[in-house]
Amino acid sequence: MAEKQHVKVMSNLRAANEAQAEVNSITLHKHNVFSFNLMGSPGAGKTTLLEKTINMVKNNAKMAVIEGDIYTSKDADRIAQHGVPVVQINTGGGCHLDAVMVGKVLPQFDLATLNILVIENVGNLVCPADFNLGEDCKVTVLSITEGDDKPAKYPLIFRNSQAVVINKIDLADYTDVNIDNMKRDILSINPEIKIFEVSCRTNQGLEQWCNWLLDNLRK
Ligand code: MG
Ligand code: ZN
């Protein structure tokens, strides 16, 4: 009986999340804002990728950021230095963002002036993939130092993403990682996924990533 109750609570929570995700999506589309949910492990380079992206697209698109973090505002402080609107969500221990958290902060943005809203999720390869936020697409950052076994071990996040940014590609010679195996596994999980090999340190591959992002705005 207890198990049945638990399943019911979980499915109610999921339905509430989906309903709010729909509201978020409608709100963003009403203002022509393209949004993506940026996911990946702690230390994969999500915030650094965002900092680079903000500077590279600033002449073509107005960006804003929601920073999901468990406790601190360290990432939001970094983003704010680039002069874009940023709102912090602290989950207070929670390991992912949900649509209700995002819906609560959307009124803090002047959506009519924006082209792109990035939602940087909590660093975690598991449950963020399972919660729709109302975003247009999901992007996962995977650094090569995490190992080429990660796509096969955490398939859901790659299955649900439209793009994966393989970061820290400049370190390839210093690791035993097999990038071809990494890419092969990602494509076997999700043949449609777009893969970018980048280094946020050397800027390798960032132009292709930014072009893809800007192409999405025109769709
Ligand atoms: Mg971060
Ligand atoms: Zn979680």
Image: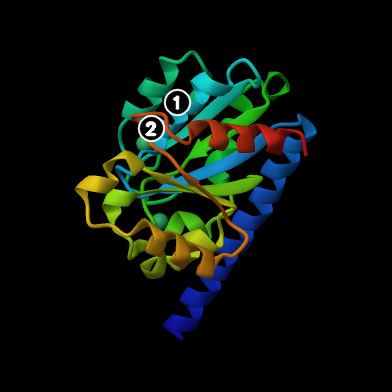
Residue nearer the viewer, 205 or 30: 205
- x then y, percent, for residue 124: 36, 52
Residue nearer the viewer, 154 or 88: 154
Identity of the amino acid at label 1? Lys
- x then y, percent, for residue 9: 52, 69
Q: Residue at x 40, y 49 (%)?
A: 40
Considering every residue shown, the one lying at the far bottom of the view is: 1
Which quadrant of the view contains residue 92? top left
Examine the rendered structure and indicate whether residue 183 appears above or below residue 166.
below
Examine the rendered structure and indicate whether residue 27 appears above or below residue 84.
below
Q: Residue at x 27, y 42 (%)?
A: 171
Which label sits on residue 52? 1
Q: Residue at x 35, y 43 (%)?
A: 169
Identity of the amino acid at label 2? Cys
Q: Quadrant of ligand 1?
A: top left
CB within 8 Å, label 2 to label 1: yes
Specify whether 49 is left or right of 217: left
Q: Label 2 CB, ligand 1: below 8 Å?
A: no
- x then y, percent, for residue 74: 31, 27
